[in-house]
Image: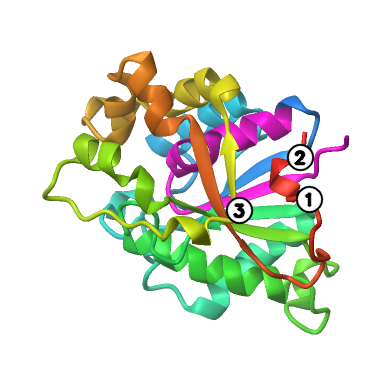
Amino acid sequence: MRVPSLLGVFAHPDDESLSAGGVLARHAEAGARTGVVTATWVEDTTRAAELGEALRVLGAGKPRLLGYADARVPESAPGCARLLDAPLEEAVARLVGQLREFRPEVVITHDACGGISGHPDHVQTHRITMLAVHAAALEQLYPETGEPWSPEALYSVTHPRSALAPIRDLVGERKAVHAVPDEQVSVSVDIAAWLGVKTAAVLAHRSEVQRGALPAQLGGLDPEARRALFGTEHFLRHPLGHLPAGADEPIARG
């Protein structure tokens, strides 16, 4: 069965690997075109270089950068606006251009909560992606960015409440964590077969490992704990009007 092309849209380098590295690797291994757009950081920075290595591991092509600064790291894009400060119209137009160039059948991004951490850049990336996916299909919007394109499906990475306990153990009680009721999850993908690839991609973000961020914590887990925490990726499907009721989940094919 043919596996659809897949484009991930995430806020920071390492979000792609932590959030959906298994699904990205799975689609690439099956022969599908896969790619990742990253909203923050720019070329010639350390984390952009690490992103390039992570994407190579995942089979997701070269970095596609929107060119904004991380909310908390001005040096991520010297002289550029923070993602949170950028005009929404401008950011949406940049992403519409990426969508029309890549022409993915499936798009994945952060959920409305901003994932486990609720990082404001994650939340803003979700907003931009939701708008851009719809705008990319309309020929009268942003005509300078290319021919219209309408993906078949849009998903956001999420976490069910039933999976929170081990995550709280990992990040600690003082940090807020965000999740959705289990019944709201549209599809859960077992990526155990690709967990080694996902882990290698996460660890390619060496500066995050060195500062003790989540990539370092993942790398320090024993295989059983790593599988329990990161061996399944969960998604919400956002209706676009293309999939008939009862159709297969495109993200779960293959």
Mark 3 vs mark 2: give the one in front: 2
Residue 80 appears in the figure: no
> Of the numbered discs in the image, which one, if any, rests on residue 108?
3
**Type of the residue with mark 1:** Asp
| Quadrant of the image occupied by residue 143 | bottom right
Q: Which residues are magenta?
A: 1-28
Kindly identify which residue carries mark 2: 253
Give the structural element (helix, strand or loop) at label 1. loop
- Marks 1 and 2, the one that precedes in the sequence: 1
Quadrant of the frame with the N terminus: top right
Judge the density around disc 2: few (<14), some (14-19), many (≥20) Cα neighbours within 10 Å: some
Q: Residue furthest left?
A: 174
Mark 1 vs mark 2: give the one in front: 1
Indicate left or right for 56 with 49 as reference.
Answer: right
**Magenta-span inclusion, residue 153:** no
Please tell me whether residue 83 is drawn above or below residue 144 in the rendered image. above
**Type of the residue with mark 2:** Arg
Label 1–label 2 contact, CB within 8 A: yes
Observer-nearest residue: 72 or 202?
A: 202
| Quadrant of the image occupied by residue 172 | top left
Q: Residue furthest bottom?
A: 140
Give the structural element (helix, strand or loop) at label 2. loop
Observer-nearest residue: 166 or 207?
A: 166
Q: How many marks?
A: 3
- Label 1 and label 3: CA atoms lie apart by 16 Å
- Label 1 and label 2: CA atoms lie apart by 7 Å
